[in-house]
Amino acid sequence: MEAMRTQSLSLRPVQLSDAALLQELFLKSPGYFALIGMEPPGLEDVIRDLHTLEKDPRRRAFLLFLEREAVGYLDYKLHYPGAEEATLSLLLIREDRQGQGLGQRALRHLMESLVGVKRLYAVVYGQNPRAKDFFLKEGFRHVKDGGPAVSWYVRTLRAGPDEGLL
Ligand code: ACO
């Protein structure tokens, strides 16, 4: 366990050429897709989604590597809903790697890198108590339910110069 903690975790922007790698990651995480009532996406779907992503300059998608192994994926939108806000739509850790602290490390890594972003939202789809617990534990609070299958969470990222005492 000790050795695992010292393994380095890095985020690399997803490229079209990563489609097969990303689809493999999804295939190895069937529990999440069962939870949201979907089939894991096929390669064509992943390629289409990556094309869509490329067209939106605010969307950012990263593969998460533990040393050289792809162990996760995350996808967020900058300047959304507000100018100084961002919204995380998916943080996924490969199923066989869940519960080992990687999600926590990845999220903290992301939050540190979001310079200039004051609030980070997380949109949780489906009945996903694990994700809800995870975000609450990471300092998010529940904001609202956008219908029966979507819940929004939010947390402040860092106090700006004028907000230190708030
Ligand atoms: N049951 C309940 N809570 C859990 C569990 C579990 N099985 N596993 C982790 N947690 C909670 C715990 O509070 C844990 O704290 P601990 O240190 O006291 O155990 C904390 O989360 C951090 O645990 P990590 O090991 O970092 O969690 P993990 O690496 O598994 O990442 C994540 C959490 C991202 C939810 C992961 O399990 C996952 O990818 N799940 C499937 C995809 C998914 O549902 N993603 C979230 C969608 S919503 C969104 O991304 C905005």
Image: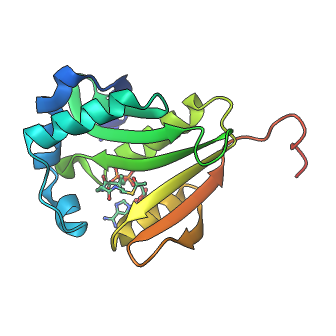
Rendering quadrant holding ligand 1 = bottom left
* Vertical placement of residue 13 versus 77, above or below: above
Relative to residue 156, is residue 104 drawn left or right?
left
Q: Residue 19: horizontal and vertical position, in percent?
A: 16, 30
Q: Is residue 151 at least partly visible in the picture?
A: yes
Q: Kindly identify the residue that appears in the image at 19 percent across and 60 percent down.
A: 33
Q: Kindly identify the residue that appears in the image at 42 percent across and 50 percent down.
A: 89
Q: Quadrant of residue 143?
A: bottom right
Q: Is residue 6 at least partly visible in the picture?
A: no
Q: Residue 112: horizontal and vertical position, in percent?
A: 58, 33
* Vertical placement of residue 126 versus 85, above or below: below
Q: Residue 62: horizontal and vertical position, in percent?
A: 35, 31
Residue, far bottom:
148
Position of the N terminus by quadrant: top left
| Front position in the image: 13 or 1 | 13
Q: How is the image coloured?
A: rainbow
Q: Quadrant of residue 70?
A: top left
Q: Kindly identify the residue that appears in the image at 27 percent across and 52 percent down.
A: 98
Number of labelled discs?
A: 0
Relative to residue 13, is residue 80 drawn left or right?
right
Q: Residue 7: horizontal and vertical position, in percent?
A: 33, 28
Q: Kindly identify the residue that appears in the image at 45 percent across and 41 percent down.
A: 76
